[in-house]
Image (cartoon, rainbow, N blue to C red):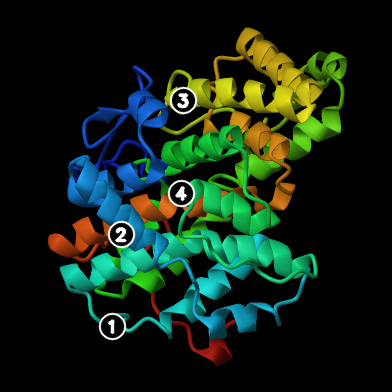
Amino acid sequence: MAVDFKAGLEDVVAANSAICDVDGKAGRLRYRGYDIGDLAERASYEEVTYLLWFGELPGRDTLQQFSRSLAGQREAPPPVLDAMQRFPHTAHPLEALRSAVSLHAMYDPDVHDNGREANLRKSARLTAQMATLVAAWRRIREGKSPVVPDPALSHAADFLYMMTGQPPDPVSAEAMDAVLVLHAEHELNASTFVARVAVATVSDLHSAVVAALGTLKGPRHGGANEDVLAMIEEIGPPERAEPYIRARLEARARMSQADRADPRNRIPGWGHRVYKVDDPRAARLRAIGRRLAERAGVLPLFETAETVYRVMKAETDLPVNVDFYSAVIYRALGIPIDLCTSIFAVARIAGWCAHMMEQYGDNRLIRPRAHYTGVEPRPFVPLEARP
């Protein structure tokens, strides 16, 4: 029997969805029909979250009510924060977040109710508190007490406030808001697909988020932005970037196909399964990165990234992806390198919840098949007859 096999399910359509449209050839991304550039420039994260969940941008009064509701739910359950105090301080932030979300489920009154209204309530609590948990872990591992959320601040501004204990300046808050919008949703990426697979079994929303967080940790998905920053810091000053990248590319050209597939041997921030041209989110992040780097006095870091960009465009046909410039932004904001992927989760929780609610709404078990490549049928050999 002929088998139409595609490794990694590349370009296989696995779901009908009204949430997000990615045009990889043209380099376009739209949430519910709205271009990502317009949303990042003109809409807040709260607006985009409402759009993803309800299908339309909210009016002024609706947005005010929705934002106030999210802001009022930012305080995490005290037992979860208490438990986090006992986590090993050596734990990676995403490991701490994954464990905290799993524990969070035990304190959510709607955890076992998979109805639409209950899932909306759980989505609101998780979206409101994901930032709280990430910020709390940063402070806990530094020997500091978590900062109580300030409902008067926007979601992005409050996230920065909870990490540092200081209200952010408007430029930093605006930058973080744009970062959250740009990372909020991206169709059937690995973590979103895993979340939909989980709820397709009629598991609960929290379990699906934990599965998504585990998937996000991999360097072929969200973990790549940490690798970008590590690479840029390893390069150092801009004049070292070109020889560094050329040496990496030359070494890669001599590798076997298996070695080239190892994430450690790739140039982080480059290449994408869907985009054949530059990721449309990268241009906006590039502009934000330059502005923040200048303000923070780390412009050489941005210039190193720019040199890497120039060399990669000259020497390869790989598109730059969302991870490349987002890493520069986090460094300019003074955010530790290993927190990068957790910030991805702070943003993407809105998209995960949108997809999970869509899956629940028209649910069928997601159960693909495997093409068997093993030995042909054979008789069982008794133990005493085996060599």
> What's the distance in space between the residues labelled 2 and 1, CA to CA?
17 Å
Query: Which comes before the other along the chain, label 3 or label 4?
Result: 4
x then y, percent, for residue 331? 72, 38
Q: From the viewer's perspective, is 208 left or right of 235?
A: left
Amino acid type shown at disc 2: Arg
Marker disc for residue 299? none
Amino acid type shown at disc 1: His
What residue is shown with label 3? 279
Q: Is residue 15 visible?
A: no
For residue 243, above or below residue 69? above
| Circle 3 SS class | loop
Amino acid type shown at disc 3: Asp
Q: Residues within 10 Å of mark 4 (few under 14, many from 20)?
A: some
| Circle 4 SS class | loop
For residue 285, above or below residue 206? above
Along the line of sight, which residue is nearer the eye, 382 or 279?
279
> What's the distance in space between the residues labelled 3 and 2, CA to CA?
24 Å
What residue is shown with label 4? 154
Q: Nearer the viewer, mark 4 or mark 2?
A: 4
Query: Which comes before the other along the chain, label 4 or label 2?
Result: 4
x then y, percent, for residue 207? 40, 73
Query: Which residue is painted at 46% across and 49% down in the image?
Result: 154
For residue 166, above or below residue 84? above
Query: Picture quarter containing residue 51?
Result: top left
Q: From the viewer's perspective, is 349 left or right of 249?
A: left
Amino acid type shown at disc 4: Ser
Verify CB contact (< 8 Å) between mark 3 and mark 2: no
> What's the distance in space between the residues labelled 3 and 4, CA to CA?
27 Å
Query: Which comes before the other along the chain, label 3 or label 1?
Result: 1
What residue is shown with label 2? 196
